[in-house]
Amino acid sequence: METTDLKSRIQELSTDLFAQVVGHRRHLHQNPELSYEEEQTAAYVAGHLDAMGIAYSKGVGGHGLVAHIKGRNPDRALVALRADMDALPIHEENEVDYRSNRPGIMHACGHDAHTASLLGVAGILSRLTDAFEGTIRLIFQPAEERLPGGASLMIRDGVLQNPVPSAVVGQHVMPLIPAGKVGFRSGMYMASADELKLVFKGKGGHAAQPHQNIDPVMACAQTLVALQQVVSRHAHPATPSVLSFGRVYADGTYNVIPNEVEVLGTFRTLNEDWRYRAHAVIRQVAEGTAAALGAQCEVHINVGYPCLNNHPELTARLKNAACSYLGDEQVVDLDLWMAAEDFAYYGQHADACFYRLGTRNEEKGITAPVHTARFDIDEEALRTGAGLMSWLALQELAFVVENSEAP
C-alpha cells in the first residue's frame, strides 16, 4: 500500500473506531485501579484483545499484558508500543457521566486515555496486517505510579526480549497542549526521582524546659534550610535539580517537644552522575546539621526512576512522521519536564521515544493539571492518540525494514 493511501486508511479507521476508543476510556475512567491492583483493568483489555483475535500473554510484571500484531514477514522487524494502566489515590471532583465509581481512586494522570488509545491502535493495525512488514508489540503496563515501577518488572519478565524491539514508543497526555497537537523532545527530557525520608531523633519533654531536652523540631527546621544549599551551592548551575519536602510530622503539641520528627521529600535531576553525588551531600548536610544541635538524623533514600532520555535519531524520525500525519503546525517542541516516568527504563535497553498528546480545551474548561482532582481530557485527543500512534509504529517499522538486510 502506498504511503499516502496508508495514511488515509489509518485516518479513516481512527474515525471509524473513535466512539469505541472513547467508550474504552470512559469505562476505564469509571473503574480505576491503583498500582499493582489492576486485575479488572487487565481483564478488560484481555477481553477486547480476544474479541479482535489478537494473541497476548498476561501476568507479565504483575497485571501486565503483551500482545503482538503480525504483518507480512513478521520476523523482519519489531516495534513496541507502551501504555500504562494504573490510577492514583485521588478523589475525583469532576461532575461528569463517566466519573470514577471508586471513592478515593481516580485516573488523574490519563492512563485510561493511554490504554484506550493502545486498544484503538490494536483495532486499527489488526485491520492492516497486509499493509506492513514486521510485528508490532503492544505493552499494556501496570504500576507506573509506584516504585519500583511496572516497566522495570515487565523488563525483568522479558518484555523486551525474544526479540529485542528496534524501538519502544510511549505516549502520555499533556494538559498544557491543546487537543489535536502533540509534542516531542530529543535527548534528555524527564528527571530522575528519588524519595527521601529524614528521621530526626532527639529527647522530648516539656516545652517549658527546653534545656532538658534535645529538640528534633529545631534540628529539622535548620536542616531543611541548610539542605537548600544542595541545589544552590553544590549542583552545577546548568544542571536542573529540584529538592523539595512535602511532609513534616512532629507528634508533639503546644507544650510538648516530641522525641522524633519525620520528613518526606523528593530529589530530582537530569544528570545521573550528579544524582548519586547529591545523595551523599544530602546525607552529609542532614546528619551534620542535626549533630551540631545534639540530635541525630537518619537519612533514607529510596532510589526511584532514572532520567528519561529520548533517542535522538528515533525521535527525529517520529517527529517528522507526526508532521506528515497531522501537519507541521500540530507538532510542537517540548520543554524539559522535572516529573519522572518509569518509561525511562525501556530506554536503558532499547531505542526509545516518549512523546506528549495534547488534551487541553479551554473552551470546555478542560485545563486542570495531571495528578489533581479536576483533571480531565478533551476526548477529541483520542482520535489523534490512536491514529498517530498507529502511523508512527508503521513508519518506524518501514524504516527498520528498509535499512535491514532481507532474510
Image (tube, helix red, strand yellow):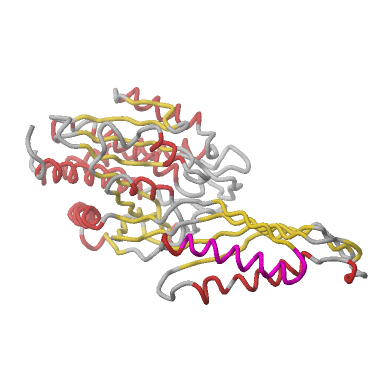
Q: Is residue 361 visible?
A: no
Dominant SS in magenta? helix
Q: Vertical placement of 348 versus 220: above or below?
A: above
Magenta span contains residue 281: yes
Residue nearest the viewer, comparing 338 with 55: 338
Q: Is residue 204 visible?
A: yes
Horizontal arrangement in the rendering, residue 397 relative to residue 141 (left or right): left
Provide the residue span drawn in magenta. Answer: 275-295
Quarter of the picture containing the N terminus is top left
Identity of the residue drawn at 28% across and 60% down: 186
Q: Which image quarter: residue 219? A: bottom right
Quarter of the picture containing the C terminus is top left
Q: Which image quarter: residue 228? A: bottom right
Horizontal arrangement in the rendering, residue 38 relative to residue 24 (left or right): right
Horizontal arrangement in the rendering, residue 341 relative to residue 1 (left or right): right
Identity of the residue drawn at 73% across and 62% down: 296
How far across and down, in percent of the image, does residue 182 sit? Answer: 31, 56
Residue nearest the viewer, comparing 12 with 253: 253
How far across and down, in percent of the image, does residue 193 sit? Answer: 49, 56
Magenta span contains residue 237: no
Q: Vertical placement of 17 versus 236: above or below?
A: above
Task: Report the number of numbered marks.
Answer: 0
How far across and down, in percent of the image, does residue 322 sit? Answer: 23, 53
How far across and down, in percent of the image, does residue 134 sit? Answer: 17, 34
Horizontal arrangement in the rendering, residue 101 relative to residue 208 (left or right): left
Q: Vertical placement of 46 versus 231: above or below?
A: above
